[in-house]
Image: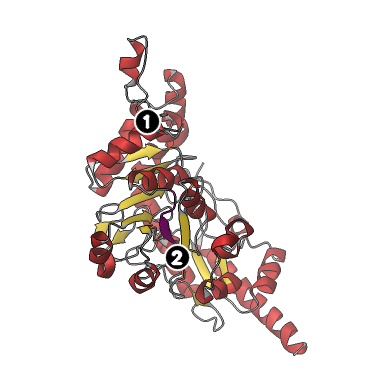
């Protein structure tokens, strides 16, 4: 199951299984209990222990984590939520589903992350929450504005979908006191197949998210089995994490130290292999602290370089087209020069744990050649 094919660089991203995941799923299937079960609760406790936090609340996806975290933070229709344009569209959809208004902010071109100064400038009287995105696994330190935000009742909800395992300073992402949302989707650093996790700030927030994820029902499964009714205490959705998915996550967590080492090693190999290429700028994930999720570069003539690499069988991608330019979010468009420039220049190189050092060297050499080919073609026409 861990066998690497000879052409793993054709894929941009890929889950990586260590082997025990399949047996763990089989055990859940044999148990006959497929919903939110002890296995889900074991996974919550294991993640909480791993991060060193009192509790973690499992949900069905990273999007569900963001949605329930926004609700738990008290974000209401009409509130403004500061969100970078440079993120997966899920972050913006979560803001919209609670009826709030996304206020798009720009990012630091070196990291594609928001900074304390960019956030400070975007705050208005209507701001109720800020959602920094830990792009590529890079921690975002908002401590210089944190006091100011707290004074104004503005919650910080970290979109840490890329950043499971990364550190902010010396503390794990999730253990810094902010509401934190993880995704355990198919290609994230740790996968459940599909899944997500919220790290709440208080026991009350944990209860709110637990109620919402099970359709607003407050009684436990065991109590429900012995009564003729059940209690619906408030708003809720079907957002629980099934034991089938939690079992995958538990097995992945057993090997997470290897995941961390491998992803860091591969990212550093890219950094070294790309260093001789003058036209290539690597997006800085803060590798000393990050478990990297992406390896992104900026290149001139991105669209042509992208097409050339695709022709050469290299699995390149773009994370992400800026959200403020998406038709669905046009109502909240504002000029964001750094995001717009990044949108035209960024290129994600194949990055997953099936890659070998040789694969990475091959990608770097092929990128160098593509830049020469495209550069020569564009010079001939200038
Ligand atoms: C993957 C992702 C999400 C959503 O997580 P899902 O588990 O796919 O719902 C949110 N934000 C970012 C930045 C992501 O990459």
Q: CA distance from mark 1 to mark 2?
A: 45 Å
Q: Which residues are magenta?
A: 77-82
Q: Check residue 97 for magenta coloring.
A: no
Residue 48: give x, y in percent of width and height: 27, 43
User: Does mark 1's beta carbon lie closer than 8 Å to ligand 1?
Assistant: no
Circle number at residue 234: 1
Q: Which colour style is shown?
A: secondary structure
Q: Is residue 220 visible?
A: yes
Q: Secondary structure at mark 1?
A: loop
Occupied quadrant, residue 254: top left
Residue drawn where x is 31% and y is 42% of the image: 47
Label 2: which residue? 267
Q: Depth check: 187 or 180 in front?
A: 180
Residue drawn where x is 64% and y is 73% of the image: 302
Q: Check residue 81 for magenta coloring.
A: yes
Residue drawn where x is 37% and y is 72% of the image: 121
Circle number at residue 17: none
Q: Depth check: 156 or 111 in front?
A: 156
């Amino acid at each position: 199951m861990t066998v690497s094919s000879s052409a793993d660089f054709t894929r941009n991203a890929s889950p990586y299984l260590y082997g025990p995941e399949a047996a763990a799923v089989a055990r859940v299937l044999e148990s006959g209990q497929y919903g939110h079960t002890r296995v889900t609760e074991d996974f919550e406790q294991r993640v909480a222990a791993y991060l060193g936090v009192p509790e973690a609340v499992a949900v069905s996806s990273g999007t569900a984590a963001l949605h329930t975290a926004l609700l738990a933070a008290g974000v209401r229709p009409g509130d403004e939520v500061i969100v970078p344009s440079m993120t997966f569209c899920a972050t913006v959809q979560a803001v919209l589903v609670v009826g709030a208004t996304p206020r798009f902010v720009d990012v630091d071109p070196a990291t594609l992350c928001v900074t304390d100064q960019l956030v400070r400038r975007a705050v208005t009287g209507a701001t109720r929450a800020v959602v920094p995105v830990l792009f590529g696994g890079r921690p975002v330190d908002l401590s210089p504005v944190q006091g100011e935000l707290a004074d104004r009742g503005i919650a910080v909800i970290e979109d840490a979908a890329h950043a499971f395992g990364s550190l902010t300073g010396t503390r794990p992402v999730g253990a810094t006191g902010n509401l934190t949302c993880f995704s355990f989707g198919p290609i994230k650093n740790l996968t459940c197949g599909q899944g997500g996790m919220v790290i709440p700030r208080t026991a009350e927030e944990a209860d709110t998210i637990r109620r919402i994820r099970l359709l607003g029902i407050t009684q436990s499964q065991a109590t429900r089995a012995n009564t003729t009714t059940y209690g619906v205490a408030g708003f809720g959705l079907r957002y629980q994490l099934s034991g089938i998915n939690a079992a995958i996550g538990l097995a992945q967590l057993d090997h997470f130290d290897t995941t961390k080492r491998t992803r860091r090693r591969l990212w550093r190999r890219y950094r070294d292999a790309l260093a001789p290429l003058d036209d290539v700028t690597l997006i800085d994930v803060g590798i000393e602290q990050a478990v990297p999720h992406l390896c992104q570069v900026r290149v001139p003539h991105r669209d042509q370089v992208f097409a050339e690499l695709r022709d050469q069988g290299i699995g390149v991608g773009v994370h992400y087209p800026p959200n403020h330019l998406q038709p669905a979010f046009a109502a909240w468009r504002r000029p964001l020069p750094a995001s717009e420039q990044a949108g035209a220049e960024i290129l994600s190189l194949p990055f997953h744990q099936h890659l070998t050092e040789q694969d990475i060297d091959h990608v770097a050499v092929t990128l160098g050649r593509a830049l020469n080919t495209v550069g020569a073609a564009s010079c001939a026409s200038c």
